[in-house]
Amino acid sequence: MKVVWCYYLQLLWIMSDVQDLTMVCDNPEKNLDGNWDERQDEYEDLEREDDSVIASLPASVDRNLDALAYSEDGSLYLGSSCITGRYWTGSAWCWKAPDLAPDVQLCTAGIETQTGISDLCYIGCDKIVLGEDSGGIELIELVTSGGRQYFNSKICIVEHDDSVTTVTCNSSKSLVGSGGTDCSIKIWDLESMICHSTLRQVHDDSITCVSFSRVSTEVLLSASLDGKVILWDFRTSQPAIRVCDVLCDKPLALDWKPTSEHYFTYGNESGHIITVDLRSPEKCLQGLQAHEKPIFRVEYSSKYDNLLATCADDNAVRVVKYVDSLPEIIYDSEDHNDFVRGLSWCPVTDRLTSCGWDKQVLHHSVPVKS
């Protein structure tokens, strides 16, 4: 009797499914709720969106962390590179919570690049510009869609004849400057992403650093392995002005003092940092031996313009404080296990963040008020 009853229930269940299927077949434009087409289209759109987001996220952060930058809201952007066989590849990342970097599982977004990333700069509105080993610059944007955030590559333009080594953005976020191992500097209009100026025949070797003034939007400094530091003032008919000429120790990195249009500091291959007054560039101000190895990057704090962070071809991160124009090291960290490559001050927490070839992102609490 129980067996017969079970067969009866199964038969009723099968007949119910057939009836539902018949209703759908009689009116294929509607399901039982009456909106089959709309739901199917919505499902397909979400499926395509999820697939694109997942596909665009790299499997892991590359070992060599080469550059980082903060946005105004404290989001951390990171550029990394690795070598696969004979070719370099790269990836760019974002963490809304910087303390989570470089954990790929907790990142906000990530995207692969075709070549290694040498430098990056934040240009506002959740956009960054990458300087790449291919000789190109790439503009990527952090996009929010369907409750998800991901990177969208807006444009990639290759105009340098060799690797891009440095990129910088002016304070009005209207121009980007790039320098490369092809001895040239290019100025890009951010709105159109067109290169409107190519500066050649001034430097005779690879460009090591370019930096826009934080006060004047059309004034740029460049340093090169030819030993020269050049001031570019695009408001004049002849923009190039030689500041330092054929130095014994070649300039490798430089940055403007945030509140001044006259003072900047550069680091050289002997590990010294030297401050220069453009009104009398032949008289360098007090210098300091910050590292034993060649300086790689220097960056002033936007909030405390007497604090300068430095890193070099070693594992040290140091902060120099200028007291009555005299520099002294007030912070020294050797927590990295390989070369330190990236430095950036967080505008929200005032902490200094560093990254390096040991795949570490470290946050430094600098005694700014001591």
Image (cartoon, helix red, strand yellow):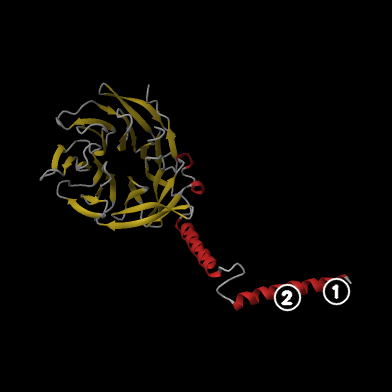
Position of the C terminus by quadrant: top left
262 or 229: nearer the eye? 262
Task: Give above or below for 283 relative to 187.
Answer: above
Left or right, 124 with respect to 20, comes to left
Instruction: Please tell me which residue is depicted at 18% across the width and 52% down the height of the picture.
Output: 198
Q: Residue furthest bottom?
A: 26
- Quarter of image, res 75: top left
- Say which amino acid is labelled 1: Val
Left or right, 265 with respect to 65, comes to left
- Say which amino acid is labelled 2: Met
Question: Measured from the top left, where is residue 141 in percent x and y?
Answer: 37, 52
* Mark closer to the observer (1, 2): 2
Secondary structure, mark 1, is helix
Question: Measured from the top left, where is residue 136 in percent x and y?
Answer: 29, 55
Give the spatial CA distance, label 1 vs label 2.
17 Å
Task: Give above or below for 331 relative to 361.
Answer: above
Q: Residue furthest left?
A: 237
Q: Which residue is mark 2?
A: 15
Question: Measured from the top left, where is residue 69 in percent x and y?
Answer: 36, 42
Crowding near the residue tagged with mark 2, few <14, some 14–19, many ≥20 C-alpha atoms within 10 Å: few
Instruction: Please tell me which residue is depicted at 42% across the width and 48% down the height of the picture.
Output: 93
Q: Which residue is mark 1?
A: 4
Instruction: Please tell me which residue is depicted at 52% across the width and 67% down the height of the picture.
Output: 38
Position of the N terminus by quadrant: bottom right
- Residues at circles 1 and 2 in contact by the CB criterion of under 8 Å: no
